[in-house]
Amino acid sequence: MLAKRIIPCLDVTAGRVVKGVSFVELRDAGDPVEIARRYDEQGADELTFLDITASSDDRGILFRIIEQVAEQVFIPLTVGGGVRQVEDVRNLLNAGADKVSINTSAVMNPQLVADAAARYGSQCIVVAIDAKQVVPGKWEVFTHGGRKATGLDAVEWARKMQGLGAGEILLTSMDRDGTKSGFDLALTRTVTDALEIPVIASGGVGNLQHLVDGVKLGGADAVLAASIFHYGEYTVQQAKQYMAQQGIEVRL
Amino acid sequence: MVDIAVVDYGMGNLRSVQQALRTVAPGASIAVTDDPHEVAQAARVVFPGQGAMPDCMRELDARGLRAAVLQAARSKPFLGICIGLQMLFEHSAEGNIPGLGVLPGKVVRFASNLHDEQGNKLKVPHMGWNQVHRNIDGHPLWQGIPQDARFYFVHSYYVQPQDNVLVQATSCYPQPFTCAVARDNLFAVQFHPEKSQSAGLTLLRNFVKWNPV
């Protein structure tokens, strides 16, 4: 049967992998190409790169990183951050990305998701949703790296993105991101139950049980984590072995 | 004349396929091409595909590639990948259109209300790493790949060959579906060997040195 995916996430700025708490206070974690290769060797199922500054100066650096990784790592690569037009999607795919993640620009211009999916196929269009709880059982979509409220309901927004052709949803809880207190399981469960397309749970992983909970309780199709892998607390393989022991189907 | 032609009909991104082939065949000349003559001349042909099959068929014809692909599928080592597998069949439920008709059978969609044994909803597209179970052993393209090795899939439709003798391997979601077919010089897979790490590279390495009789 299909395995649940474990996806290390590399937040990249100025050619380095960094990690912050709730989208601020960045800490250096190393060279992206080296880290990507290490996670591939450890059995990562996919890799996600997010260009967190997405400034034009850094764009060239990001392209070179993706090119280098794609030459050495033969698992799906998702790249996001600063994708504003169909041409940005094309450029990232040409650099070696297999999927492109669209976040803020999907809110500014939902047609971008439809156009990109029509042009390159839903399989390579991931819509990233940064969600924050407003009241229990209700979440709002935020953009611009979590700084800007949109007034959009996260569940309705995810459904709309599915309808426009998104192949997958990368769902980040901003309340949990960087806190190491576990996924927002209610958010994950609510969104995954509302959709036909796969959902990647993100934000808050601090230990291996959190990954298990994301799948078993949250119903996620894939789980994404950053800092637990970056700082050597756990290898991807350890994470998979633990999940397998808990009865989750993984690729070992 | 190139060693390997990757048929490029303008749908999606072929860089991953090209990169993986370069890795397994460093000495070979590889062309990602929409030129029917180059496809016709190549020693081997890789026929990938992404997106929706109606668009793929339309773009293939718009570039005048149909004849060259049909000829290659009948005459030289030929590897179909994903939609490149589906297009070989007679008919697809996606857009309710005819395919190339190289192989008898059809392409159908996964049902939308699938559940696993625990009652969890199974998403469509079928996306991720699934086990590939070989029904028959001995095809040279599987050499060095363990039974039930996992490959990376992303698709909402799958092929139903009319003749079971074509079926090389199946995968389960949750019911078994055909994920690899072979006939003579032709081999085609639903999964993405170019994105399936060591198992995928092994299959591609086997393909670039495959000499079907």
Image: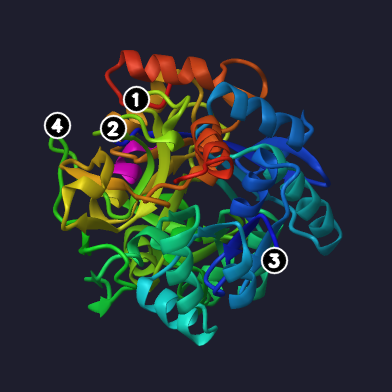
Distance between the alpha carbons at the discs numbered 3 and 1: 37 Å
Disc 3 on helix, strand or loop?
helix
The residue under label 4 is which amino acid type?
A: Gln
Residue under the image location 65 percent in, 49 percent down: A50
Residue A185 belongs to the span the image colors magenta: yes
Mark 1: few/some/many CA within 10 Å (<14, 14-19, 20+): some
Which badge, 1 or 4, comes first in the chain's sequence?
Answer: 4
The answer to whether any part of residue A82 appears in the image is no
Distance between the alpha carbons at the discs numbered 3 and 4: 41 Å
Residue under the image location 63 percent in, 45 percent down: B20
Whether pointer 4 and pointer 2 mark residues with C-beta atoms closer than 8 Å, the reply is no
Tell me: residue A76, above or below residue B186.
above
Where does label 1 land, which residue?
A: B147
Distance between the alpha carbons at the discs numbered 2 and 1: 6 Å
Q: Nearer the viewer, mark 3 or mark 1?
A: 1
Distance between the alpha carbons at the discs numbered 4 and 2: 22 Å
Q: Which of the two residues, B31 or A188, is positioned nearer the viewer here?
A: B31
Whether pointer 2 and pointer 1 mark residues with C-beta atoms closer than 8 Å, the reply is yes
Disc 4 on helix, strand or loop?
loop
Label 3 resides on the chain identified as A
Q: Which of the two residues, A123 or B4, is positioned nearer the viewer here?
A: B4
Mark 3: few/some/many CA within 10 Å (<14, 14-19, 20+): few
Where does label 3 land, which residue?
A: A91
Magenta region's main secondary structure? helix
Which badge, 4 or 2, comes first in the chain's sequence?
Answer: 4
